[in-house]
Amino acid sequence: MRKNNYLMSLGLAALMIGGLIFAPYGGHADDGLQQSKATFAGGCFWCMEEAFEKVDGVNSVVSGYIGGQVENPTYEQVSAGGTGHTESIEVTFDPNKVTYAQLLEVFWRNVDPTTPNAQFCDHGNQYRTAIFYHDENQKQLIDESKKRIESSKTFPEAIVTEIYPASVFYIAEEYHQDFYSKNPIRYKYYKWNCGRVKRLEQLWGKA
C-alpha cells in the first residue's frame, strides 16, 4: 500500500506519540446549528477531507474507518487490509445550506468509481469507494444520483462504487485529521504522485 509506505518513509510514525483516538464516533454536539451526517469512502481520507471541507454548508469533516469487523482499529491494522474497514470520512453539514444530493455530486467527482478495491496508487479493499447511508431518504438519493451518473458519464467503464447502511465509524488517529492543511508539502507530494489529479481529470474533466 503506497500510502502506508509513504507515511513510513517520511517518519510520520513519530507523530503517533501524541494521543491516539480509537473511540466510535457519535457525531458532534449541537451548537444550535442544523446538522446532518454523511459518510463516504473514496480512497485516501486526506484527499476526501480536502474536497469536502471546501464545501459551503459543511461544518466538519472527520477521517476514520467504517465497515469492518474489528473494534477500535488502528491505521496499521486497516492499511494492512485485514479488518474489513475502509478509509472514510464523516461529514457533518447544515442541510439548509447544502443538500445531501449536492454532497453526492462532490463525492462522485472526487473518486474513480470504476476501480474495485483500489483508488489510484492505493490498492486493497480498505481503499474501495463506497457510500454509507444513514436513513432511507439518503439511500434513495444515492440510488438516484448513481443512475444519473451512469446515464451521463463519458467514460466506458462500469461504476462499481458500493452502497451500504452506515455502521460504527471509528475516528482515525489525530495525525490524520486535516493532514492536507497541517502538512501541505507532504500532502501535495503524495496526492500528485499517487495519480489522483490526473485520473480525476480523465474521468470528469478539469472542472
Image: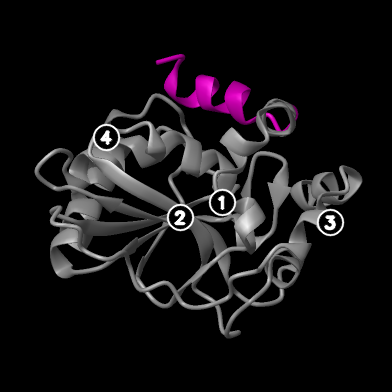
The residue that label 3 is drawn on is: 14
Residue 20 appears in the picture as rendered: yes
Q: Is residue 25 above or below residue 7?
A: below
* For discs 4 and 2, the disc positioned in front in the rendered view: 2
| Circle 2: residue type | Val
Residue 68 % position (x, y): 55, 77
Provide the secondary structure element on which disc 2 rests. Answer: strand
Using the rendered view, name the quadrant where residue 193 is placed: top right
CB under 8 Å between discs 4 and 3: no
Quadrant of the drawing holding the C terminus: top left
Q: Upstream in the sequence, badge 2 or badge 3?
A: 3
Contact between marks 2 and 1 (CB within 8 A): the answer is yes
The residue sitting at the left extreme is: 96
The type of residue carrying mark 3 is: Ala
Give the residue number, with chain letter if any, for mark 1.
177
Secondary structure under the numbered disc 1 in the rendered image: loop
